[in-house]
Amino acid sequence: MAHCCGHDLHTSCLLGVARLLSEEKARLRGRVVLIFQAAEEALPGGGRMLMETGLLQELGVEAIYGLHTYPFLEPGQITTREGRLMASPSEFIVEVNGRGGHAAAPHQTVDPIVAAAQIVTQLQTIVSRNTDPLEPAVVTVGKINAGTARNIIPEKATLEGTIRTFDIARTREIFARIRHISEHVAAAAGGSAQAELIEGYPPVINNPDTTARLLRVAGPAALPLDAPVMAGEDFAFYQREIPGTFFFLGSGSDEADSRHTWHHPRYNVDERCLKTGIAVMAGLVPGYCEAIQKRL
């Protein structure tokens, strides 16, 4: 089981950076800290836990950079933008309670599956009718669980999903609507519902100075990114205290069948992107020799 996002390639890329920098250690100025990503897809996120240890602060880290594979560009290309890059992802769970019974006698039950289906439909109105159309927001139900057999109406149904915004206050407003809709739709069906919000990472906001440096190092490999994306990333926890920039590494090609979007079951990467990822990350280190970059 995997969420298919390229984290194995991220690890390989950083190992390549480590090897190159260790070979040219005498040329480097200052200290370089390499962070392998832990628990990025599981709240509260490895970035938050690492920052809470105080280790990076003790080491005096002054700038931080990170990358993620990007199937929408070719190997040899990167993209990023100053300011808003990625959204803040939070999670929600809704439990709908009814009264179970035989599928042949629905009138003797309170069907939580029907109520859950109506809740999913009603949640689609939150972004279109309850949020500012000029502010990005996403509400997605990604998991529904109910029932044990075809001829049984279950006691409960559970919905799980995600809220994406660039402002935690907006996330809380959206969740309030999720809770209100869930409780009242379930009550109208004769049941009840409880909703829980699990707040996630902050948004990824790229620092102007570190972004400008990244673009200089990447040169013509860097392409503009016109708008932020609504995916989330725990790199945001580093940026709360350390100036930093996150960027996307082109990994899509027809040859590698790697143009499928993140989390697609056939997600793949074109490993030729390692060359670019290693060169850019190593090139960000002060004192790193340009001749070494050229050999990549």
Image (cartoon, helix red, strand yellow):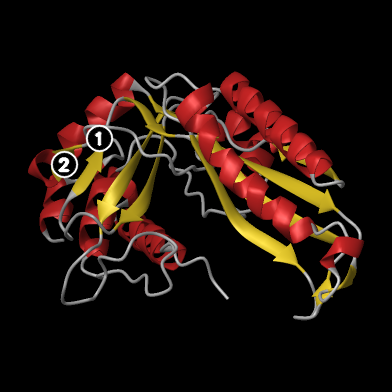
The residue at 37%/19% (across/down) is 134
Q: Quadrant of the C terminus?
A: bottom left
Secondary-structure class at tag 1: helix
Tag 1 near tag 2, CB within 8 Å: yes
Q: Residue 40 location, x and y as percent?
A: 57, 51
- Please name the amino acid that badge 1 sits on: Leu
Q: Earlier in the sequence, mark 1 or mark 2?
A: 1
The residue at 57%/46% (across/down) is 121
The image's mark for residue 264 is none
Which residue is the site of mark 2? 222
Closer to the observer: label 1 or label 2?
Answer: 2
The image's mark for residue 214 is 1
Q: Quadrant of residue 133?
A: top left
Does the rendering let one see residue 203?
no
Q: Residue 291 location, x and y as percent?
A: 11, 51
Q: Residues within 10 Å of mark 1 (few under 14, many from 20)?
A: many
In depth, the one of 53 and 256 nearer the eye is 256
Q: Quadrant of the N terminus?
A: bottom right
- Please name the amino acid that badge 2 sits on: Ala
The CA span between labels 1 and 2 is: 9 Å
Q: Residues within 10 Å of mark 2 (few under 14, many from 20)?
A: many
Image: 189 above or below 55: below
Q: Residue 231 location, x and y as percent?
A: 44, 44
Q: Residue 189 location, x and y as percent?
A: 80, 46
The residue at 91%/63% (across/down) is 108
